[in-house]
Amino acid sequence: MSTEEQMKERRREYARQSYQRRKQYFKDYYRNHKERMDDLAKRHILGYRKRLVDLLGGKCARCGFSDYRALQIDHKNGGGRKETLVRGNIQMYLRYLKSPEEAKLHLQVLCANCNWIKRVENKEVKHK
Ligand SMILES: [Zn+2]
């Protein structure tokens, strides 16, 4: 092998290693970044949820329970299957926060207990 070929070989090897390192770096970066983003999104969602709960009266429409931790946003007409207010659905929160009238028309705040009772009453869940 000539010196020139050796040089080329070394450069190729170096390039390959640095490619691997970069790949690993971006993988790690993405993973860390993603966790931060998820965290951020979660905090945003919590803020939006609280605002929407406030907009809708800030307490359970049935029993008046007012601890945010157990309050849920419920679709009055059981439309929850089509339009779920699941965690992560920021668009939904934003849409309703922008149009309070629409929110009050379609949504209500229920505590976890009343929400379950409503689902059983509406036969949305099978009651054993
Ligand atoms: Zn309640």
Image (spheres, rainbow, N blue to C red):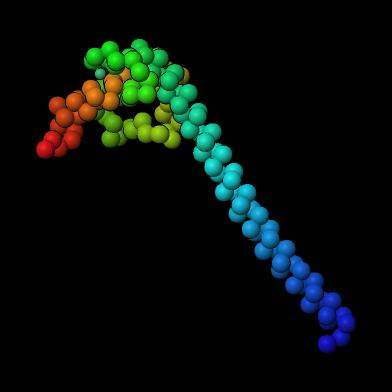
Residue farthest to the left, as pictured: 128
Residue 55 x/y as whole percent: 40, 14
- Give the residue displayed 48% in from the left and 33% down from the top: 42
The residue drawn where x is 18% and y is 35% is 125
Q: Is residue 95 visible?
A: no
Whether residue 117 is visible here, answered yes or no, is yes
Residue sitting at x 16%, y 30%? 120
Q: Give the x, y percent position of residue 35.
A: 54, 42
- Using residue 34 as the reference point, say whether residue 3 is left or right of it: right
- Expressed as whole percent of the image width and height from the top left, the position of residue 16 reads 71, 68
- 104 above or below 90? above
Residue 23 vs residue 55: left or right? right
- Between residues 71 and 119, which one lies in front from this camera angle? 71
Quarter where residue 78 is shown? top left
Eyeballing the image, is 87 above or below 4? Answer: above
Q: Which image quarter holds the C terminus?
A: top left
Query: Which of the two residues, 42 or 65, is positioned nearer the viewer here?
Result: 65
Quadrant of the image occupied by residue 114: top left
Residue 82 lies, in percent from the top left, at 30, 34
Q: Nearer the viewer, residue 22 or 78?
A: 22
Q: Quadrant of ligand 1?
A: top left
Residue drawn at point x = 88 percent, y = 82 percent: 3
Number of marks drawn? 0
> What quarter of the picture does the N terminus occupy?
bottom right
